[in-house]
Image (tube, helix red, strand yellow):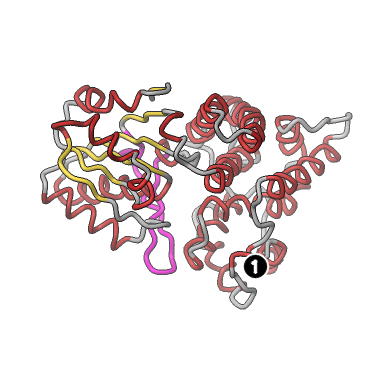
Amino acid sequence: MLYGRGRLAELGEMLGSLDRTRAVVVTSPSVRRSGLVARAEAALGGRLASVFDGTRPHSPVEVVREATALAARVGADAVVSVGGGSAIDTAKGIVHFRLEESGTRLAHVAVPTTLSGGEFTGAAGITHGPIKRLYRGPHMPASLVLLDPDAAAITPLSLLLPSGLNAFHHCVEGVCSVRPNGMSDAMFLHAIRLLATALPRLRERPTDLEARGLAMVGAALAALAIPGVPMGMGHALAHAIGGRYKTPHATTHAILIAPVMQFNHDAVVDAQASIADGLGVSDDGDPARAARAGIDRVRSLLVDFGIPPGFSALGVSGDEVEDVARAAMDDPCFPTNPKAASLDDVVRVIRSAL
């Protein structure tokens, strides 16, 4: 992982350090229009093989397959993702499918512009119709991650702030995990402090590149802490709802944080109190009261950041609640929720998030 303003200009050298010579840039139409891709192309120079700018939200499998075919056709030995979570997951999908097809792992250099942290994790969420399938493996994390606040400066707050709460959701479910550890707790809790400092600063001063950098480091810490720490119902519901309704990934996570925390509250009081402390909420010697205040603080952040408080604002109705609940219960994250939940419980959580 490399950090610093202006480091994008070193992209070609970074690819050379991995002994790779032919890279496909993977990005979205909006990021390409921003001019950032042109800067990446210039930095790659003769190491640029092609550009795939057709990524779509939730990384539909047909799009990932199309990008994989392009990588094979141009003889790519690397992918460079430039953008948010969908570009990163599409690039990870290319690595996965090319490994299946050829037995060779493509290097992946990630230049994230949001705070999803997907570049660090060992899984990619790829949608097959209404179902989001997680592809996992040791080949999934990016080979090299470039955190450049100047690159992230292209991202409007309407996208960046929800993605910051997506990173915060990793922290919440990580601290409350059924299998936490001292190392992960230290990383998650410090990530919460960084995000709780940086995101409100960005809301007030969108051009504050130092705050963007702090937020990027917080998101990186949150993602790096995940391996070996199971997530819970919040992530299961995000996969189920996002897969079915194609709601924005980060906003989906943001909306689910407080309702799932509320459901899990009595099973993880001390963990939630530590989360509240990271948010700057006073303990006052009563962990349960602090935990509840922390949940209220999460709800207020959605309001402060202009994020819808419920899924009805995104066009999601309650007509298919039981189907969504069953899909969530089939998700690999669901069995490791810190509190057992029945179908009726999950239905109630979803309804509370509408």
* 254 relative to 347, above or below: above
Vertical placement of residue 332 versus 198, above or below: below
> Dot 1, how many residues are within 10 Å of its Cα: few (below 14), some (14-19), or many (20+)?
few
Please count the marks in the image.
Answer: 1
Between 59 and 83, the one lying in front of the other is 83
Q: Give x and y (percent) for residue 79.
A: 25, 40
Q: Is 3 located above or below residue 264 in the figure?
A: above
- Identified at 40% across, 58% down, the residue is 133
Q: Tell me where residue 306 appears, x and y as whole percent.
A: 66, 50
Mark 1 lies on residue: 312
Q: Name the foreground residue: 194 vs 6.
A: 6
Q: In the image, what residue type sits under mark 1?
A: Ser
Query: What residue is at 59 percent from the left and 65 percent from the top?
Result: 314
- Residue 309 appears in which quarter of the rendering? bottom right
Q: Position of residue 25 (x, y in %)?
A: 25, 42
Closer to the camera, 125 or 227? 125
Magenta stretch, residue numbers: 121-142
Find residue 205 and report its image quarter.
top right
Q: Quadrant of the N terminus?
A: top left
- Residue at image point 84% right, 31% down: 283
